[in-house]
Amino acid sequence: MEKIASFTVDHTRLQPGLYLSRTDKNGGTAVSTFDLRFVAPNREPVIDMPALHTIEHLGATFLRNSARKEEVVYFGPMGCRTGFYLLMFGELSAQNVLPLVADMCDFILSFEGEIPGARPEECGNWREQNLETAKFYVKKYLGELLNARRTQYPGA
């Protein structure tokens, strides 16, 4: 079997940032996949599950209500718990989506109240949420994202 592209990225060198992972085309439709890497893989603790779940709920809510909602295909966590994937229609660059991701982070940082979609009839694991810890990870990520502006995989 061929090794998939995401397994060819050297995770020992990867830093927190916003990276274009790939662009796939089918006919006239393009989908760009972005890697929102919140923590340095294999060097920092992974995002804890309640915070990861809260970021997923709030991030998806923001993105699906944003001015660019028609472009959003998917937002969800990485299995390794070091960040999230954002899939959007179009041939986009990390610079194209950086303002949207920064606005999503600002939304999460200012959010107060009941987590959207966190009721038993709306979510299969509705109790596992932690807004304060989610804000900790988002604040750290936003700071690193805006200070370092990492938008290209190391060695790419």
Image (tube, rainbow, N blue to C red):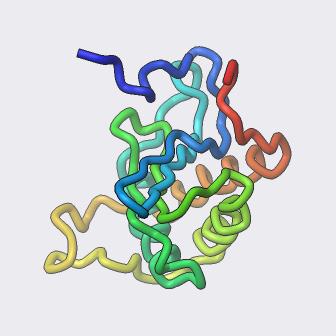
Q: Is residue 141 left or right of residue 68?
A: right
Q: Is residue 62 left or right of residue 99?
A: left
Q: Is 27 or 144 nearer to us in this picture?
A: 27
Q: Is 143 or 129 nearer to us in this picture?
A: 143
Residue located at (49% from left, 62% from top): 88
Residue located at (42% from left, 43% from top): 48
Q: Quadrant of residue 125?
A: bottom left
Q: Is 97 or 30 nearer to us in this picture?
A: 30
Q: Is residue 80 left or right of residue 124?
A: right
**Relative to 116, residue 11 above or below:** above
**On-image quarter of the C terminus:** top right
Q: Position of residue 55 (x, y in %)?
A: 47, 60
Residue located at (57% from left, 78% from top): 68
Q: Position of residue 118 (x, y in %)?
A: 29, 74
**On-image quarter of the N terminus:** top left
- Name, please, the residue furthest toward the right: 147
Q: Quadrant of residue 149?
A: top right
**Relative to 29, residue 81 above or below:** above
Q: Is residue 3 left or right of residue 34?
A: left
Q: Is 137 or 22 nearer to us in this picture?
A: 22
Q: Position of residue 57 (x, y in %)?
A: 39, 68
Q: Position of residue 26 (x, y in %)?
A: 35, 55
**Relative to 52, residue 135 above or below:** below
